[in-house]
């Protein structure tokens, strides 16, 4: 047994993000002394294989966090809000995936390759990861900011059903099957309204009085905060599309100085876990064909002919893996290393 490795608790272990975390812990060989899986009463007693052993899922309602070093919350906001303080009261390092703490000034909202330096001064409050599109967006914009400065960003997203968790995937698949059988069938529309099957829905999250959606507001706020550019002119337009998993986005960036296309492509391609796809027909990435789910996939980089400071790019991110799970594990590793030198941060 590795006595320097953390005892990990994964809350929300039965959800789509929790499942992606388990896969990554196994695939990347993330060190741990033990791992406890926690979910709702509905899943208590289920057994899930982790590293070749069957782990029994426990109920959060009566779970005791004593002895845990690291607790990862992959739960909805209301659940995180209620139980994150319980885990912290037991002294655990807590990393939350939900929106519950992201705007809290005492919370560190982190994408470690961009603002991991904020972890230099423990002790920490709650550590949070941003939404799945913010992660690739800030990774790429951070590079552009250092290269030519960023003046304006306009992002249009095409977001997958898995952003709404396991139920979101089920609703899309059920609706698609029904619609194929009977084009006049009434499709389930609990999470997506109107139904997402064979449709495009121009709202993600709730609509605000301003006409923007909460998802659009969230991406704008998170991007400014993580890049430490509080006045960044950024505007997002978020659309849900009938794709099971994998977000896409078209991103327009205006830099402060003229941009050279090949130079920009080479810079982005040099970033850890970023792939720039070629220009030949069909080479651009899509949610189905992008490949490695732990990388950010970029294509169609093109400078605007009438404005050499501006360019477009197309990005694809697996919203569960590179967009969320990997970032949460990077936060956990970097923070653990700060707290307990020797725990080691290896994920880049
Ligand atoms: N999906 C994404 O692409 C993505 C990306 C970034 C961040 N996030 C955030 O990650 C969080 C989890 O999302 P998800 O997509 O994995 O959702 P999900 O598939 O619906 O999973 C939710 C998890 O929470 C558990 N849960 C529900 N109610 C609970 C309760 N009262 N007590 C304890 N556990 C409870 C569920 O357990 P049961 O199975 O027992 O119900 C399940 O394990 C959300 O805050 C989401 O915003 C998701």
Image (cartoon, grey):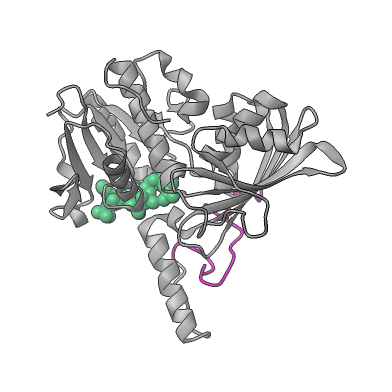
Whether residue 98 is visible, yes or no, is no
Percent position (x, y) of residue 210? Answer: 66, 47
Q: Point out the stretch of residues depicted in magenta.
A: 190-211
The answer to which of 161 and 190 lies nearer the viewer is 161
Q: Quadrant of the C terminus?
A: top left
Name the one closer to the observer, 120 or 38: 120
Indicate whether residue 206 is drawn in magenta. Answer: yes
x, y percentage for residue 231?
68, 27
Q: Is residue 31 magenta?
A: no
User: What residue lies at 40% left-to-right and 39% top-to-bottom?
Assistant: 326
124 or 80, which is in the foreground?
124
Q: Which residue is found at the position 72% from the left and 45% from the top?
A: 312
Q: Is residue 263 visible?
A: yes
The location of residue 262, given as percent across then percent down, is: 71, 37
Name the residue located 43 percent from the left edge and 26 percent from the top edge. Answer: 107
Residue 21 place in picture, x, y as percent: 32, 43
Dominant SS of magenta comes to loop
- Where 345 sits versus 65, above or below? above
Q: Quadrant of the N terminus?
A: top left
> Image check: 72 left or right of 114?
left
């Amino acid at each position: 047994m590795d006595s320097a490795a953390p005892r990990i608790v994964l809350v929300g272990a039965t959800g789509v993000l929790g499942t992606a975390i388990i896969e990554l812990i196994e695939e990347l060989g993330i060190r741990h002394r033990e791992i406890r899986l926690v979910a709702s009463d509905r899943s208590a007693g289920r057994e899930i294989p982790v590293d070749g052993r069957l782990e029994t899922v426990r109920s959060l309602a009566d779970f005791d966090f004593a002895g845990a070093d690291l607790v990862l919350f992959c739960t909805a906001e209301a659940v995180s809000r209620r139980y994150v303080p319980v885990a912290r009261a037991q002294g655990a390092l807590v990393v939350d995936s939900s929106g519950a703490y992201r705007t809290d000034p005492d919370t560190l909202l982190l994408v470690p390759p961009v603002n991991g330096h904020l972890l230099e001064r423990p002790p920490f409050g709650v550590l949070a990861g941003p939404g799945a599109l913010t992660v690739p967006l800030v990774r790429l914009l951070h590079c552009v900011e250092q290269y030519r400065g960023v003046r304006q960003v306009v992002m249009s997203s095409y977001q997958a059903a898995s952003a709404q968790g396991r139920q979101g995937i089920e609703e899309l698949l059920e609706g698609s099957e029904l619609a194929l059988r009977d084009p006049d069938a009434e499709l389930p529309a609990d999470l997506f309204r109107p139904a997402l099957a064979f449709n495009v829905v121009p709202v993600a999250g709730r609509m605000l009085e301003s006409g923007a959606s909460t998802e659009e507001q969230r991406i704008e706020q998170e991007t400014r905060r993580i890049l430490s550019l509080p006045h960044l002119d950024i505007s997002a337009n978020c659309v849900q599309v009938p794709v099971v998993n994998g977000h896409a986005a078209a991103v327009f960036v205006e830099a402060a100085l003229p941009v050279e296309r090949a130079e920009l492509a080479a810079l982005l391609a040099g970033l850890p876990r970023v792939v720039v796809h070629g220009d030949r027909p069909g080479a651009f990435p899509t949610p189905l064909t992008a490949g490695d789910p732990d990388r950010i996939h970029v294509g169609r980089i093109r400078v605007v002919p009438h404005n050499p400071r501006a360019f477009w790019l197309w990005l694809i991110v697996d919203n569960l893996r590179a967009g969320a799970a990997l970032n949460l594990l990077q936060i956990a590793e970097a923070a653990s290393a700060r707290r307990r030198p020797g725990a080691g941060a290896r994920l880049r």
